[in-house]
Image: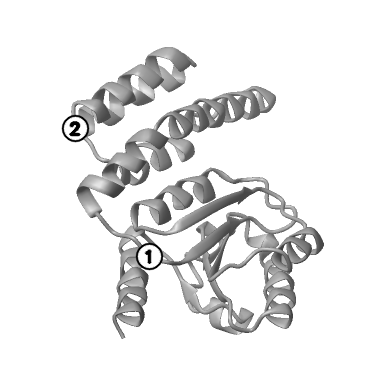
Amino acid sequence: MNDFYNNFLTYLEMENREKALNYVLEKIKNKEIDIVSLYTKILSPTLYEVNFWEDESYHVWKEHVRSSIIRTIIENCYPYVIKERDNKYNIKHNKRVAVICPKEEQHELGARMVTDFFILAGYDSIFVGANTPTSEFISALKKIELDYIAISVSNYYNLVDTHRAIQKIKSIDENIKILVGGNAFKNKKDSYKDMGADMYLNNFSDILSLGEEDSHEISI
């Protein structure tokens, strides 16, 4: 795994989208790594391992280019997500989840990966994306049926808007379960309770545990 990580990081530092993409897809195709391990042990860590250059504006450039490359890789992994869902996990729930980021939250790659985790766990998973205005999401909520809303928050300063969004969503439909996750909660994992959310998701295992509860409901 260390060699994989270091080789991939080298391609990212070179800003070589083609080599980075082909390297990852070859590993997945040959079953040298699965989607969960790829996302949690390779892609997520490399998002944060950015060298700092003297020119701060160049740092921002590098960070954006790296995010763009990783986004391309995630989108190209979708067929393998479906294959793993059907062949490795073989789970199907009659549940729908929407994955969103609150207003002003621009970091959406974590949410994008979580969307694939829900797919692996057998959910009908909808990726809404970054900076989702609460008013627009509420309008959509009146027209579509959802069992869960997963809110991904990376920036601590966006927790206030997250709290407001949760309150408004609950006022529309108190039966919808609100799930939260992201770096903003890592040092305050129990804060989701004060915000009115129903569960904090830390990893893929938490999503599988949620699925076990849903399977139990179906069996009853």
- In the picture, the disc for residue 160 is none
* Residue 109 image offset from top left, x and y in percent: 53, 43
**Residue in view at x 74 percent, y 53 percent:** 104
> In what quadrant of the picture does the C terminus appear?
bottom left
**Point 29% across, 80% down: residue:** 219
Element assignment for label 1? loop
In this picture, is 144 found above or below 129? below
Amino acid marked by disc 2? Lys
Q: Give how far across and how far down residue 126 sits, in percent.
A: 55, 52
Residue at the image position 50 percent from the left and 27 percent from the top:
72
Q: Is residue 12 left or right of residue 92?
A: right
Gap between marks 1 and 2 measured at Cα:
26 Å
Give the quarter of the figure containing the N terminus.
Answer: top left
Say if 58 sits above or below 105 in the image: above
Q: Residue at x 48, y 68 (%)?
A: 187
Q: Are circles 1 and 2 on residues that touch, CB within 8 Å?
A: no
Which amino acid type is shown beneath numbered disc 1? His
Instruction: Report the front residue among 176 and 49.
Output: 176
Where is residue 6 drawn, in percent x and y? 29, 26
- When the figure is inspected, residue 148 is found, relative to residue 99, above or below; the finding is below
Q: Is residue 192 left or right of residue 117?
A: right
User: Which numbered marker is on residue 31?
Assistant: 2
Residue under label 1, please give it.
93
Q: Is residue 18 left or right of residue 99?
A: left
The x and y percentages for residue 185 are: 52, 66
Q: Earlier in the sequence, mark 1 or mark 2?
A: 2
Front-most of residues 71 and 84: 84
Crowd tier of the residue under label 2, counting other residues whose Cα lies within 10 Å: few below 14, some 14–19, many 20 or above: few
User: Within 10 angstroms of label 1, few (less than 14), some, or many (20 or more) residues?
Assistant: some
Label 2: which secondary element: loop
